[in-house]
Image: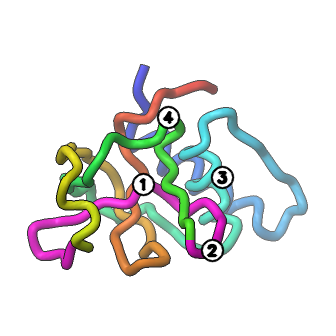
C-alpha cells in the first residue's frame, strides 16, 4: 500500500497538536515521520496542494533524499520541475516522475516532496 495525501496531512496535524502537549508519536514510515516532525516544528501542510515533478535516478527506498554536503537526511524527496535549475552532474541519470506534497526546500535549493509512492509501513 502507498502513502496517501490524507495520511501525510493527518500525521502533520498530529504534530501540530502535540507541539504543546509533550506527547510524541513515531512512525515506521519515514515520510510520515517527516510530516509529523514538520508539525512539531510548527509547519502546517494542511493547505498544500500536490505537484508532479521529476528527479534524476530512482528515489531511495524510504523516499527521503540524503544531503551529502551536510551529511544529513533532507525533509523529503528531492525533485525538480520544468522551471527548476538542474545541476549538470545529474543529466546522465534516468529521469523518474513522482507526485507528492511540496513541503520544504533542500540544501541545494531543490523542492522536497512527501511522495505518494512511499510504501506505507504503519
Residue at 18% across, 47% down? 95
Pinpoint residue 17: horizontal percent, then vertical percent: 70, 60
Q: CA distance from mark 3 to mark 2?
A: 28 Å
Instruction: Tell me: residue 38, above or below residue 1.
Output: below
The residue labelled by disc 3 is 14
Disc 4 secondary structure class: loop
Disc 3 secondary structure class: helix
Residue 40: image quadrant is bottom right
The residue labelled by disc 2 is 70
Indicate which label's residue lies in the foreground, 3 or 2.
2
Pinpoint residue 80: horizontal percent, then vertical percent: 23, 64
Q: Earlier in the sequence, mark 4 or mark 2?
A: 4
Span colored in magenta: 69-86
Crowdedness near tag 3: few (<14), some (14–19) or many (≥20) residues, C-alpha within 10 Å: some
Residue at 43% across, 66% down? 103
The residue labelled by disc 1 is 77
Amino acid at each position: 500500500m502507498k502513502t496517501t495525501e490524507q495520511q501525510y496531512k493527518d500525521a502533520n496535524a498530529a504534530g501540530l497538536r502535540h507541539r504543546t502537549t509533550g506527547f510524541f508519536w513515531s512512525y515506521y514510515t519515514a515520510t510520515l515521520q517527516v510530516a509529523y516532525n514538520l508539525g512539531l516544528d510548527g509547519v502546517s501542510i494542511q493547505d498544500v496542494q500536490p505537484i508532479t515533478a521529476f528527479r534524476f535516478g530512482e528515489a531511495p527506498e524510504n523516499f527521503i533524499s540524503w544531503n551529502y554536503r551536510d551529511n544529513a537526511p533532507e525533509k523529503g524527496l528531492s525533485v525538480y520541475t520544468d522551471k527548476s535549475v538542474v545541476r549538470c552532474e545529474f543529466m546522465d541519470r534516468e529521469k523518474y516522475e513522482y507526485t507528492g506534497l511540496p513541503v520544504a526546500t533542500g540544501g541545494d535549493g531543490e523542492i522536497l516532496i512527501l511522495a505518494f509512492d512511499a510504501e506505507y509501513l504503519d
